[in-house]
Image (tube, rainbow, N blue to C red):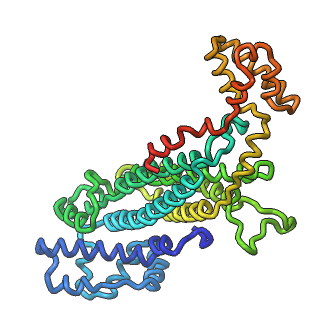
Amino acid sequence: MIERYTRPEMARVWSEQNKAEKWLQIEIAVCEAWAKRGVVPTEALAKIRKAKFDLDKWAEYEREMHHHFNAWLRSVSDSLGDESRFIHFGLTSYDVEDTALALRLMEATELMEKGVAELMEAIAALAKEHKTTAMMGRSHGVHAEPISFGLKLAGWYDEMRRNSHRLIDAKEQISYGKISGPVGSHATVPPDLEDEVCGDLGLMVEPISTQIVHRDRHAYFIGTLAVIAASLDKFATEIRHLQRTEVLEVEEPFSPGQTGSSSMPHKRNPEKSERISGLARLMRGYSMTSLDNVALWHERDISHSSAERVVLPDACTVLDYMLNLFAYIVRGLQVYPERMKENMEASYGLVFSQRVMLALIDKGMTRQDAYKVVQANAMKSWEARTPYLDFLLDDEHIRSKLSRDELASLFDYGWYLRHVDASFERIGL
């Protein structure tokens, strides 16, 4: 991933240095296990524990050998003598690469779990602050009925809570290693050694591996990251709509000295939320690539490898960035309750139409008749740009059922917020 969207901690996880360190950790762990079985002499093990690699030499050897892992092994061997013959004993490269990949994916997931928790905390704080801030609820982009801004945010919080659970499950799915030899048959490395090494590394063992850990695990993992990104896209899209000039109920943070356009100095664009939406498109693409990586020839081909070098680190890096950026947006979000009230009143009270209809039904009118008379007056109000209540008060059919005071009492925004506390209690806010 380009530096612009890469945070330092995640960059470290996916660095060549960290990868090589994990590879060496696994190679040494395997030698430790072989030593217990009498394959690696004790005196050799002491030197193996001090084995090193050289990134520059590794790159130099790869240009000659055209094999990423063998070049690394050669670099490690440079730090040893005859003891180098015990490094990688009985293994295939992906015994080390896939097991190390699991360790790095776990590290990356821990960073994303932290990002999810911090975002949930930010959303919860804003939801509580605006628990009873009335705003227009919209369906199809059109005024529907009032809600509270806090209730909208509470929905985001609960969605992120689900995403938190999904991420925990996805982490479990990729916490598997394999030390089973060239095609997973354990012909050159016994199953008990695999159990021991993976256990010491904090990993579970792929029960039946091939030359690799099965890629449905990674597809599930990246798919989960894409779902979380889709949620962030959903939230960001809402902010983008609410920041439109004609709506202007919220604005994302706009810092001192920030500009919105090279040509129009007045612009305050929702560019951070738009960035979230754009990066979510990448995440959906990564998910598709990961699904394509599931089907490989026989016990393994290498078609997945080149794609994974991009998709796995980039997906983790992008989501880590998105979580951090959206938490920043939420913490600095400007909310305009008065503008929300103005927008609610912009539809002349039509949003109370269901309350009027239900009141007429309660007075004995059939639902079909009530709907027709309520709708007819709503259309008149909208076309005349005149308060809805005025038309209702002039309608004989309605006045025969509801008094002036009864009608006026129905036009109460607070009525729509009376169960907000119960909704918050459902999700522990």
| Residue placed most toward the observer, 86 or 374 | 374
Q: Position of residue 354 (x, y in %)?
A: 67, 26
Disc count in the image?
Answer: 0
Please indicate whether residue 27 sits to the left or right of residue 254 in the image: left
Q: Residue at x 73, y 36 (%)?
A: 142
Q: Position of residue 327 (x, y in %)?
A: 56, 62
| Residue 71 sits in quarter | bottom left
User: Does residue 380 lie above or below 54 as drawn?
Assistant: above
User: Does residue 243 lie above or below 396 as drawn?
Assistant: below
Q: Residue at x 69, y 52 (%)?
A: 337
Please indicate whether residue 41 sits to the left or right of residue 210 in the image: left
| Residue placed most toward the observer, 429 or 138 | 429
Can you see residue 310? no
Q: Residue at x 31, y 58 (%)?
A: 176
| Residue placed most toward the observer, 257 or 306 | 257
Q: Position of residue 103 (x, y in %)?
A: 36, 66
